[in-house]
Image (cartoon, rainbow, N blue to C red):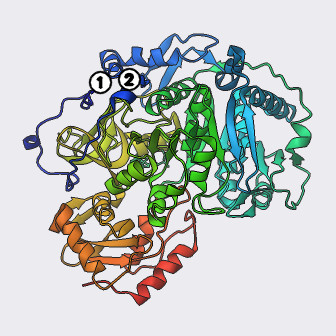
């Protein structure tokens, strides 16, 4: 069965209606990969989903919600009368933890593994659904014994260990609101998040294993909690056994949790009861506490996890490599997979410990069939070379996913060929902390994919690309990505600051959610993400996305990764400055810079030819792997480097600075 992907729901004007491009459409991609007949024949998704959602969007979402276990049915599927504050499945009651764990055990699947846990040092542990139920019940009892009640906030600051999922589920079970803070964040980042949410409890560990060493977490908690009067207790998981300071608020997890009864009566909560807050730092200002609620969120993450990854609960092993500190870890390590009764792999460490083939060794060991990761990881593996994955048996893989940044077409092709053995469909999934679940993505078995495109909005989701006046740009045009309809997993606001919610997402154009991303539509109406609009460059009046120039650079066989910024230029307004990492083993010979400049001009046009190309060993990235172009702009414009507190590796800027002193690549 071959089906073409339906175009975006709203009618688009033709190109001649549009005066100018909000963002230029420079690149062209002619490669396309239709689903194989074998995959399509067994796929969870069919093209009928698009028809059903187009016929009645709300009824479609109700149908998805019915896959969950509700204690009480909803009376109103969507109440949008208080827009932009949505209520989904209003009147309905359910318990998220019961949906993720209890119901599978009750249906006879207690012996199925929920998580294969692999620690970085090589320790491993399988946790069945029955064991997970016991753990979650004990933890829920423990939280209640510490006086945590429905609606209270609990901060979770843990490495990637099973207790992280248990802690989240225990909160959900008793209606407490979790705020997971990434374990790599500083004491001050933790403190400000505890304060903003007024958390009453912190769940942490002595430390975690990272890059071959125990990495302490407890000292940051001690510092944060000392300045946080709202915190009554700190529950500490023993993971590494390293020494810890002890305060009178501290309790060992094993002392408190293991002593609890292993059953727990779960109450149901309103569909709009808060489930979690997750802080996103954005580019400027105070982190925003993105608020998600229960029924709509679980509906969308469950539906997207089943259809986008084609999850077969009885046979698949699903591995989402994201940390639980990010929304991807919430939606596709914990809630979506568990609600679908998946068997997942959870890995504590980094891809290069103890060797650069660690991930592929794990794919072989656990027969991972679905792998969901980020472009930054894929580009790193490209840099390391394809002989590393070639040493492992990865024939179990059948679906590959990407999330977090635009994936350059050549990185997509590499992922497909080297990791997927040319047989696995790739789903490039666009979404945000704010959207809660996947919004734009191919459906494997249905969509003909193009390398680098997230393709179209999922059934039930409304997305458009518009110009400055909110007019749809039409096929072939570039502009701003907007969401045109409320969706079940949408954020319900910013914790404590609803005005900021309205201002940030809903004020640019009436009734449209502005995602902050640039995008274009190709001739067939497929959506190509072009990066954050703050990063768009203006060269001689042409608005050029960083993504297209970066992808052109990455399409050169010598290049593994690149980051492009606009630096002020007397002649052209802004000039394009590119930072490039070469693939391992490539000789940075004399001509490489000139070659690369010509290559970009040839691939996407002379207007996009970089003014300057700098060869570097590393790029500044956030801890979730996104390139921090803001800092590169500082370098390109010879400014003092700005705020580096969200940088994953503080040394990177020094390294890049040193590289610049010795190499002036301008020609
Ligand atoms: O710019 C888009 C980019 O990541 C942003 C959302 O980041 P965050 O809230 O941290 O969530 C990341 C995981 C969902 C988006 O506004 N982004 C995410 N996925 C893609 C992407 N850009 C292009 N293609 C994607 N598939």
Identify the image quadrant of the C terminus. Answer: bottom left
Identity of the residue furthest to the left in this view: 16
User: Who comes first in sequence, dot 2 or dot 1?
Assistant: 1
As drawn, the label of residue 1 is 1
Asked if residue 417 can be seen in this view, the reply is yes
Identify the image quadrant of the N terminus. Answer: top left
Q: What crowding class fits label 1: few (fewer than 14 Cα within 10 Å), some (14-19), or many (20 or more)?
A: some
Does 234 sit left or right of 349 as displayed?
right
Asked if residue 324 can be seen in this view, the reply is no
Identity of the residue furthest to the bottom in this view: 662
Looking at the picture, how far across and down is residue 275, in whole percent?
A: 62, 32
User: Residue drawn at (38%, 72%), measured in percent from left and top?
Assistant: 580
Mark 2 secondary-structure assignment:
helix
Looking at mark 2, is its residue's CB closer than 8 Å to ligand 1? no
Nearest the eye: 206 or 16: 206
Q: What crowding class fits label 2: few (fewer than 14 Cα within 10 Å), some (14-19), or many (20 or more)?
A: some
Looking at the picture, how far across and down is residue 249, in whole percent?
A: 88, 49
- Picture quadrant where residue 352 is located: bottom right
User: Residue drawn at (57%, 18%), measured in percent from left and top?
Assistant: 68
Looking at the picture, how far across and down is residue 107, in whole percent?
A: 68, 15
As drawn, the label of residue 133 is none
Looking at mark 1, is its residue's CB closer than 8 Å to ligand 1? no
As drawn, the label of residue 41 is 2
Nearest the eye: 544 or 337: 337
Mark 1 secondary-structure assignment:
loop
Q: CA distance from mark 2 to mark 1?
A: 7 Å
Looking at the picture, how far across and down is residue 470, in whole percent?
A: 24, 40
- Picture quadrant where residue 588 is located: bottom left
User: Residue drawn at (71%, 20%), measured in percent from left and top?
Assistant: 105
Label 1 near label 2: C-beta < 8 Å?
Answer: yes
Does 621 sit left or right of 33 as displayed?
right
């Amino acid at each position: 069965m071959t089906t073409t992907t339906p175009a975006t729901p709203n009618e688009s004007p033709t190109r001649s209606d549009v005066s100018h491009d909000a963002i230029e459409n420079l690149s062209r991609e002619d490669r396309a990969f239709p689903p194989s007949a074998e995959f399509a024949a067994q796929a969870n998704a069919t093209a009928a989903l698009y028809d059903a959602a187009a016929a009645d969007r709300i009824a479609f979402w109700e149908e998805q919600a019915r896959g969950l276990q509700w204690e009480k049915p909803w009376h109103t599927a969507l109440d949008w009368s208080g827009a932009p504050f949505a209520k989904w499945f209003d009147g309905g009651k359910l318990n998220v933890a019961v949906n993720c764990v209890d119901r599978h055990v009750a249906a006879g699947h207690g012996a199925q593994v929920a998580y294969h846990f692999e620690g970085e040092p090589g320790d491993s542990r399988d946790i069945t659904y029955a064991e997970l139920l016991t753990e979650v019940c004990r933890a829920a009892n423990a939280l209640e014994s510490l006086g945590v009640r429905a609606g209270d906030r609990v901060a979770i600051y843990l490495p990637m260990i099973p207790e992280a999922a248990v802690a989240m589920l225990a909160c959900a079970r008793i209606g407490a609101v979790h705020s997971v803070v990434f374990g790599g964040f500083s004491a001050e980042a933790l403190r400000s998040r505890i304060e903003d949410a007024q958390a009453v409890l912190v769940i942490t560990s002595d430390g975690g294993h990272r890059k071959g060493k125990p990495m302490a977490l407890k000292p940051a908690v001690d510092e944060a909690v000392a300045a946080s009067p709202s915190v009554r207790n700190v529950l500490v998981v023993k993971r590494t056994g390293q020494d810890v300071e002890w305060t009178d608020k501290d309790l060992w997890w094993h002392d408190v949790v293991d002593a609890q009864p292993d059953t727990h009566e779960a109450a149901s909560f309103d569909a709009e009861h808060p489930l979690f807050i997750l802080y996103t730092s954005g580019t400027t200002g105070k982190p925003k506490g993105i608020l998600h609620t229960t029924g709509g969120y679980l509906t969308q993450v469950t539906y997207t996890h089943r259809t986008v990854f084609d999850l077969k609960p009885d046979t698949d092993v699903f591995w989402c490599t994201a940390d639980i500190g990010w929304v991807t870890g919430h939606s596709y390590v914990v809630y979506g997979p568990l609600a679908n009764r998946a068997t997942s792999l959870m890995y504590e460490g980094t891809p290069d410990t103890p060797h650069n083939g660690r991930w592929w060794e794990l794919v072989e060991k656990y027969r991972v069939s679905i792998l969901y990761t980020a472009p930054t990881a894929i580009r790193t593996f490209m840099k390391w070379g394809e002989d590393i994955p070639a040493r492992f048996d990865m024939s179990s893989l059948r679906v590959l996913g990407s999330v977090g940044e635009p994936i350059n077409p050549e990185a997509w092709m590499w992922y497909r060929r080297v990791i997927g053995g040319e047989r696995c469909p790739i789903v490039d999934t666009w979404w945000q902390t704010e959207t809660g679940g996947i919004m734009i993505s191919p459906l494997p078995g249905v969509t003909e994919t193009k390398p680098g495109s997230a393709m179209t909005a999922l059934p039930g989701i409304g997305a458009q690309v518009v110009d400055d006046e909110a007019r749809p740009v039409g096929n072939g045009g570039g502009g701003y990505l907007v969401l045109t309809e409320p969706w079940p997993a949408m954020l319900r606001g910013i914790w404590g600051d609803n005005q900021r919610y309205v201002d940030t997402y809903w004020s640019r154009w009436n009734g449209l959610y502005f995602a902050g991303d640039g995008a274009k539509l190709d001739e067939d109406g497929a959506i190509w993400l072009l990066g954050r609009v703050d990063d768009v460059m203006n060269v001689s009046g042409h608005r050029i996305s960083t993504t297209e120039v970066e992808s052109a650079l990455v399409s050169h066989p010598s290049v593994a990764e690149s980051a492009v910024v606009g630096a002020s230029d007397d002649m052209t307004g802004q000039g394009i400055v590119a930072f490039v990492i070469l693939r391992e083993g490539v000789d940075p010979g004399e001509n490489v810079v000139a070659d690369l400049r010509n290559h970009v001009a040839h691939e996407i046009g002379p207007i996009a030819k970089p003014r300057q190309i700098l060869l570097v060993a590393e790029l500044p990235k956030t801890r979730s792997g996104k390139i921090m172009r803001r800092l590169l702009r500082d370098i390109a414009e010879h400014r003092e480097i700005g705020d580096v507190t969200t940088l994953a590796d503080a040394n990177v800027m020094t390294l890049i600075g040193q590289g610049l002193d010795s190499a002036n690549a301008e020609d």
